[in-house]
């Protein structure tokens, strides 16, 4: 007790500051890559809102991110704001203690900046304000935005008026490269367009004519706002199909597809446009004469599996098995009274055919379209099936009081993605199906049962995994679900076997630059050295303010560690991307219940583009 009292008295004698005492925060806003000040810039300190953790989500919610179902522990507070002076300097004289995000922005001309940001479009980190302590020397770097402008023409070199033009950038989903829309606009009466306020990077431009004869308007989800302020969106919609009468009197159906600069419908032939800081890229002109191609169709009959009678009102959707461009086109229809259907707007690719008849059941099959129309499809619906599963834990015992493992099913291939936010549904289209299914899981015998699973191909997504555990395998009979996925096409008593190991390993380390200085707020990625088809073995963390990192819960084995100053999330699972940096990785051996220590050199942002 005497020691404690002596310690408290020492704190008072040293001028200890009460927890609620405000602190001063000041710094400068400068041009990215230089010390040139940017005056008259709005600087904001936004309090990080504390929320109740739901479904394993973090307890800190950055401002601007709205997730339904989360309950706030603290009400949102208005941001503290100020303006930089003529020398680009800003100051907040009295900031209450807490966790904040610090931003700088201007109405136009510059990309917004955030504290801890490593590239013009990178994500920042929070700033923890302690009572009474001054915070000085903060730098927020803003990069000038660029622009891309050009013209879209028709076959006769006439302007393509009101063509829908998309600015596209690269992204990744489930380890596969995809395209997403960064911006969208329409051409004017001269066929001209312009994209502005563009952060530095690589982009593609696409265009699609608007035809008033088509009544199908795409369905689009809202773009993500935070944490990547320059995220884009993928659009989902029905194919734009028109009917045209030839000179011979024959009626033909045509499908309007996207055309990419410099005038190709093939993604691989599209030409990337590199925009540097503040660069105005002009004269990006191309023709969309080849946007109309013959439309193919599929016909068939849907039967009610319960009665054997024709199924009226069954929703038929064709999901492409390979993503094409930034727009997901889903041909769909509804069966007639006699169970017959006709789907228009198909291409020559492969599809997953999903049929939904409400509570009566579902149906599934794959269609590998050839060179012509698909005729004579006959499919009967079935009720969802119960799929048994159980988990075992080797090398130890899991506390039975711990929350049970949660299992979700993701459509394979994962083309649909997560549920759209604030979607806009238009007449004439049935909308997308569920891409992620969370069936009810009930205890049964020594395991569990997933209730009423519709037919299809799936991969498993697990959550609520016990601390320290790592996934060893997921099998169902002879199926290796981790590598090959799982097919549910009928009743089966073969259970899903999920096996965990409990003596996982971990790795601690620091990230440094070429000068051996530590690097804060950079991603560190753990990549399996050999089995790179297993997505669950990849891990990503971000270094703290001292450049340190820790990755735990790792399955024993050989790995490589990489760190990029800024990198597209998931790019490291693309073999073509990783091939360039393979020699920059640091090998690490993770042993069971052991900790490894290492140092990783960061790959600069300029080399990661």
Image (cartoon, rainbow, N blue to C red):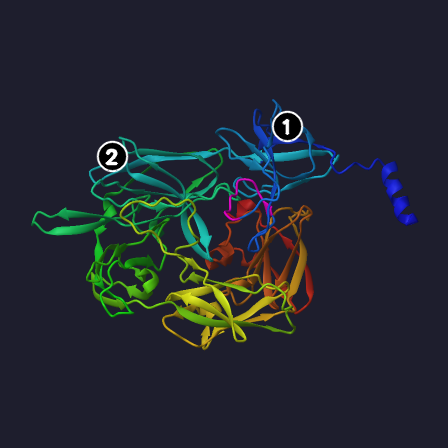
| Foreground residue among 469 and 369 | 469
**Which is in the foreground here, disc 1 or disc 2?**
1
| Foreground residue among 601 and 365 | 365
| Label 1 packing within 10 angstroms: few (<14), some (14-19), many (20+) | many
In the image, is residue 65 part of the stretch drawn in magenta?
A: yes
| Foreground residue among 326 and 259 | 326
Assess whether mark 2 and mark 1 are in contact (beta carbons under 8 angstroms). no
For the record, the magenta segment spans 60-69
Residue 47, image quadrant: top right
In the image, is residue 510 part of the stretch drawn in magenta?
A: no
> Residue 601: where, in percent of width, then height?
63, 52
Residue 217, image quadrant: top left
Identified at 22% across, 51% down, the residue is 293
Residue 144 in view in this figure: yes
Identified at 61% across, 66% down, the residue is 469
Real-space Cα separation, disc 1 to disc 2, in angstroms: 48 Å
Q: What is the magenta segment's predominant secondary structure?
A: loop
Secondary structure beneath dot 1 equals strand
Image disc number at residue 159 = 2
> Residue 233: where, in percent of width, then height?
42, 45
Image disc number at residue 262 = none
First in sequence, mark 1 or 2: give its number.
Answer: 1
| Foreground residue among 585 and 114 | 114
| Horizontal side, residue 326 vs residue 73: left or right | left
Instruction: Check the image and report above or below for 592 versus 519.
Output: below
Instruction: Check the image and report above or below for 140 versus 449.
Output: above
Residue 8, image quadrant: top right
Q: Which residue is mark 1?
A: 90
Secondary structure beneath dot 2 equals loop
> Residue 602: where, in percent of width, then height?
61, 50
């Amino acid at each position: 007790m005497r020691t404690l009292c002596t310690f408290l008295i020492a704190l008072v004698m040293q001028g200890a500051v009460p927890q609620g005492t405000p602190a001063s925060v000041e710094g400068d806003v400068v041009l990215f890559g230089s010390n040139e000040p940017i005056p008259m810039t709005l600087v904001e300190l936004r309090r990080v809102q504390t929320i109740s953790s739901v479904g394993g989500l973090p307890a800190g919610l950055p401002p601007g991110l709205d997730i339904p179902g989360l309950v706030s522990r603290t009400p949102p507070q208005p941001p503290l704001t100020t303006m930089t002076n003529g020398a680009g300097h800003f100051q907040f004289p009295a900031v209450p203690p807490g966790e904040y995000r610090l931003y700088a922005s201007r109405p136009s001309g510059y990309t917004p900046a955030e504290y801890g940001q490593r590239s013009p479009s990178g994500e920042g980190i929070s700033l923890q304000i302690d009572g009474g302590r001054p915070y000085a020397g903060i730098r927020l770097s803003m990069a000038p935005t660029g622009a891309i402008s050009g013209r879209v023409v028709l076959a006769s070199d006439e302007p393509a008026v009101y063509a829908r033009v998309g600015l596209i950038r690269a992204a990744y989903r489930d380890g596969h490269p995809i395209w997403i829309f960064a911006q969208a606009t329409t051409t004017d009466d001269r066929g001209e367009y312009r994209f502005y306020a563009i952060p530095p990077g690589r982009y593609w431009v696409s265009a699609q004519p608007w035809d008033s004869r088509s009544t199908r308007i795409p369905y689009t989800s809202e773009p993500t706002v935070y944490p990547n302020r320059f995220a884009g969106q993928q659009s989902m919609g029905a194919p734009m199909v028109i009917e045209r009468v030839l000179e011979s009197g024959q009626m033909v159906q045509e499908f309007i597809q996207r055309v990419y600069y410099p005038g190709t419908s093939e993604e691989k032939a599209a030409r990337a446009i590199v925009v540097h800081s503040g660069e105005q890229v002009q004269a990006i002109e191309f023709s969309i004469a080849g946007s109309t191609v013959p439309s193919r169709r599929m016909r068939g009959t849907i039967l009610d599996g319960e009665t054997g009678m024709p199924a009226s009102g069954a929703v038929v959707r064709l999901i492409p098995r390979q993503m094409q461009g930034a727009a997901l086109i889903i041909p769909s229809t509804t069966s007639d009274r006699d169970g017959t259907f006709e789907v228009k707007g198909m291409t020559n690719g492969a599809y997953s055919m999903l049929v939904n008849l409400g509570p009566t059941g579902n149906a599934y099959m794959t269609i590998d379209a050839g060179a012509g129309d698909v005729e004579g499809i006959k499919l009967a619906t079935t009720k969802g099936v119960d799929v048994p599963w159980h988990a075992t834990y080797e090398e130890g015992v899991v506390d039975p009081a711990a929350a049970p493992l949660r299992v979700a099913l993701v459509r394979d291939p994962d083309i649909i993605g997560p549920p759209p936010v604030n979607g806009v549904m238009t007449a004439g289209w049935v909308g997308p199906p569920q891409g992620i299914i969370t069936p009810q899981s009930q205890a049964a015998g020594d395991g569990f049962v997933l209730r009423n699973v519709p037919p299809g191909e799936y991969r498993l997504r697990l959550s609520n995994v016990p601390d320290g555990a790592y996934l060893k395998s997921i099998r169902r009979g002879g199926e290796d679900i981790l590598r090959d996925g799982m097919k549910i096409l009928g009743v089966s008593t073969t259970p899903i076997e999920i096996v965990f190991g409990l003596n996982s390993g971990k790795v601690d380390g620091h990230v440094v630059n070429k000068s051996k200085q530590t690097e804060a707020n950079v991603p560190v990625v753990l990549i399996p050295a050999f089995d790179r088809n297993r997505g669950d073995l990849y891990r990503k963390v971000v270094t703290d303010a001292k450049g340190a990192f820790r990755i735990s819960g790792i399955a024993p084995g050989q790995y490589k560690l990489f760190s990029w100053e800024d990198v597209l999330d998931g790019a490291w699972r693309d073999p073509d991307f990783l091939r360039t940096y393979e020699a920059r990785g640091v090998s690490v051996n993770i042993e069971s219940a052991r900790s490894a220590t290492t140092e990783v050199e960061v790959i600069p942002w300029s080399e990661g583009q």
